[in-house]
Image: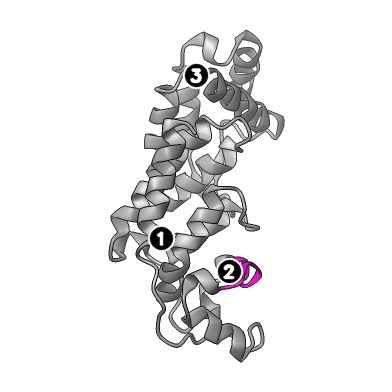
Amino acid sequence: MTTAQQRLHHALDALDRTARPGPAVGGCEHCYTAGQLAALAGPPALVPNGLLHSVAAKSPDHWTDFPTLYRRLAPRILRQLTTGTLAVDGPLVADRLVAAGWPDWHRAELVREVLDAWWPAALADPGADAAEVLGTLAVATGTVTPWLRTWAETPTATANRHLADTLDRWLAYGELPDLRLGFHRDLPVGPEVAAWITGLPPHRIGEDRRHWLELALRN
C-alpha cells in the first residue's frame, strides 16, 4: 500500500467513527418501503448496498431531511466511492454532497480530509479514472484549482499517464477550451484548465498532444 493509499484509508477510518444510528427517516413512500426507511434510520453499517447506492443517487426532494440522512450515510458512501465499489457516478455524489451542505456538517473537516487524500491516491493508482475523480472533487469543493496544483506537483509516471488519458478524452470529445465538469456539466473550468495544461513542462503531455491541444484552443 502506498503512502497516499494509507492516508486515504486513515481518513476513511476516521470518518467511519462518526457513523451513528439516527432519527426516523421520512422519504418517498413510492420509492422506499417502510422497512427500507427503518433500515436507513439504523446503524449505517447495516444498510444494504443496494439501498445505500439508491440513496446516494436520489435527489434531495425524495427526503424529509436530506442533509441529515446524507451526513449519516456519507462515511459509507465516500468509502465505496473512493475505493471504486459505489454503483453511482462520482460527480453525481458530489452534487448530492453539495446539496446536503457538507461544509457545514459537524466534523466536516473529516470529509475534507477524505477528499484531500483521495486525489493523490487516485493519481498513484493506475486503475483510477482521474478525469472522473477530478470532476467529483471539483464539484464537491466548488473549485478545480487545488486539484490541478496537486497534479502539477505530482510528475510521476502514473500521474502523467492519467494526464495523457484525461487530455485525450477532453480532446476527443471537443471539450476544450469550454470544459465544464460535473454530472450536469455545470462547473465551467475551461479557461483555467487550458492555462494550466499549457503551463506544464512539455514532456508531461508530449509533443503530439500539445499540437492537438494548441489546435483545439485556437478554435
**Position of residue 26 in the picture relative to residue 176 (left or right):** left
Residue 199 image point, x, y percent: 44, 17
Q: Give the range drawn in magenta.
A: 47-54
Mark 2 or mark 3, earlier in chain: 2
Residue 103 image point, x, y percent: 32, 59
Give the residue displayed 33% in from the left and 54% down from the top: 110
Query: Residue 133, relative to residue 29: is it above or below?
Result: above
Give the residue displayed 49% in from the left and 34% down from the top: 1
Query: Residue 48, relative to residue 90: is it above or below?
Result: below
Q: In which quarter of the image is residue 131?
A: top right
Instruction: Give the residue furthest to the right.
Output: 172
Q: Residues within 10 Å of mark 1 (few under 14, many from 20)?
A: many
Give the alpha-carbon distance from disc 2 to disc 3, as whole Å. 35 Å
Give the residue displayed 49% in from the left and 22% down from the top: 197
**Position of residue 131 in the picture relative to residue 109 (left or right):** right
Residue 63 image point, x, y percent: 51, 81
Foreground: 113 or 160?
Answer: 113
Name the secondary structure under disc 1: helix
Q: Name the residue under label 2.
A: 52
Q: Name the residue under label 3.
A: 156
Answer whether residue 206 is visible to the viewer in this image.
yes
Q: Residues within 10 Å of mark 2 (few under 14, many from 20)?
A: many
Which circle marks residue 16 in the picture?
Answer: 1
Name the secondary structure under disc 2: helix
Q: Give amino acid for label 2.
A: Leu
Mark 3 or mark 1, earlier in chain: 1
Mark 1 or mark 2, earlier in chain: 1
Depth check, mark 3 against mark 1: the one in front is 1
Q: Give amino acid for label 1.
A: Asp
